[in-house]
């Protein structure tokens, strides 16, 4: 399932038959880099080949998905970048993701910058690794992209993991559906999961894409964060790539729910 998630973070959204037994970079070379002209032409029809749009998209793909971070990476002002984001949302490349409003602190906060998620994981991969290095790719010189991808391969699926976790919660809370669910962030804190159900229950949680099992300290950190934010959560959810310590598993109950990558199998199928 870990392999499936890593491959999905690259090929998600493409109608491609992907063999998980083949090394990921081999598939990237054979299916994407060797077919650069095909995908480039398709994207040009949407982005119009606009350098500003491409710079903003690369800033989002390589950063934390917040608009102000993307503008900083692209070295442009908000006044120049916001119309580009609006265009890309209208043309189904990006989706604007505002933080759910659960508490008065969030309602009054002016610290938050909207996040923009790629509609397909493949598009994030393309603008993170392919678009910025196109000059070498068109010459079939792939060493630079291989090195850059290998340097970020370990953490690249993190954003996809968090979004899949949210989608999974939408599925399993059908009997008490969410009226709002997303992530919360400001300059000090980030919550990967924050939402409110129809019955008024507040659900909060974190996602960790790490090779280590999640320990009780992560739960304590989450509880302290919620207290500082003035949030009272009825249900805490923890998603961990490699599972949980025995101490943490012993605390599992209806109000503390633990999930691993295996729970996301239906979404990755």
Image (tube, grey):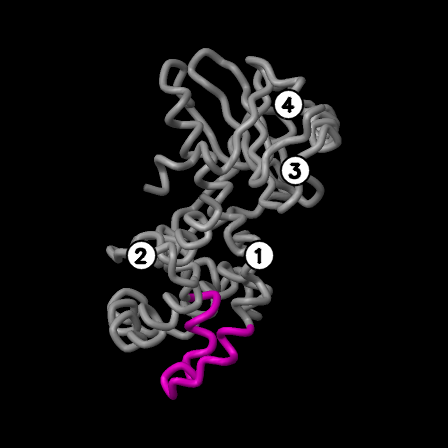
Disc 4 marks which residue?
A: 249
Asked if labels 2 and 1 touch by Cβ distance under 8 angstroms, the answer is no
Residue in the foreground of this view, choosing between 152 and 107: 152
- Does the image show residue 226? no
Magenta segment, which residues? 127-147
Give how far apart the Cα atoms at labels 4 and 2 are: 34 Å
Q: Position of residue 85 (x, y in %)?
A: 42, 57
Q: Is residue 229 left or right of residue 27?
A: right
Disc 1 marks which residue?
A: 154
Q: Which mark is residue 213?
A: 3
User: Tag 4: Cα neighbours inside 10 Å, few (<14), some, or many (≥20)?
Assistant: some
Height in image: 161 above or below 72?
Answer: above
Q: Residue furthest front?
A: 21
- Does the image show residue 134? yes
- Sequence-first tag of 3 and 1: 1
Please give the name of the residue rendered at 58% of the width and 15% of the height, measured from the top-left corner.
255
Please give the name of the residue rendered at 26% of the width and 57% of the height, measured from the top-left corner.
16
Q: Quadrant of residue 141?
A: bottom left
Q: Which callout, 3 or 1, points to the residue nearer the camera? A: 3
Secondary structure found at label 4 = helix
Residue in the foreground of this view, choosing between 26 and 54: 26
Secondary structure found at label 2 = loop
- Sequence-first tag of 3 and 4: 3
- Sequence-first tag of 1 and 4: 1
Disc 2 marks which residue?
A: 18
């Amino acid at each position: 399932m870990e392999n499936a998630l890593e491959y999905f973070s690259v090929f998600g959204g493409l109608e491609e038959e992907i063999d998980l037994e083949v090394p990921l970079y081999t598939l990237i070379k054979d299916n994407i880099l060797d077919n650069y002209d095909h995908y480039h032409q398709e994207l040009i029809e949407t982005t119009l080949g606009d350098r500003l749009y491409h710079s903003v998209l690369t800033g989002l793909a390589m950063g934390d998905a917040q608009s102000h971070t993307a503008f900083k990476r692209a070295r442009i002002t908000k006044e120049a970048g916001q119309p580009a984001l609006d265009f890309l949302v209208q043309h189904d490349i990006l989706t604007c993701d505002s933080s759910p409003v659960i508490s008065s602190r969030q309602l009054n906060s002016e610290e938050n910058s909207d996040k923009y998620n790629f509609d397909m994981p493949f598009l994030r991969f393309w603008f993170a690794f392919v678009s910025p290095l196109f000059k070498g790719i068109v010459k079939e010189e792939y060493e630079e992209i291989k090195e850059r991808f290998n340097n970020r391969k370990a953490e690249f699926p993190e954003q996809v993991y968090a979004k899949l976790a949210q989608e999974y919660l939408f599925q399993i809370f059908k009997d008490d559906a969410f009226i709002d669910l997303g992530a919360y962030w400001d300059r000090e804190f980030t919550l990967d999961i924050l939402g409110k159900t129809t019955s008024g229950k507040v659900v909060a949680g974190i996602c960790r894409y790490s090779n280590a099992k999640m320990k009780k300290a992560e739960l304590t950190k989450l509880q302290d964060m919620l207290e500082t934010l003035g949030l009272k959560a009825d249900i805490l959810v923890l998603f961990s790539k490699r599972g949980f310590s025995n101490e943490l598993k012993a605390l599992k109950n209806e109000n503390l729910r633990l999930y691993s990558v295996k729970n996301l199998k239906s979404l990755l199928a």
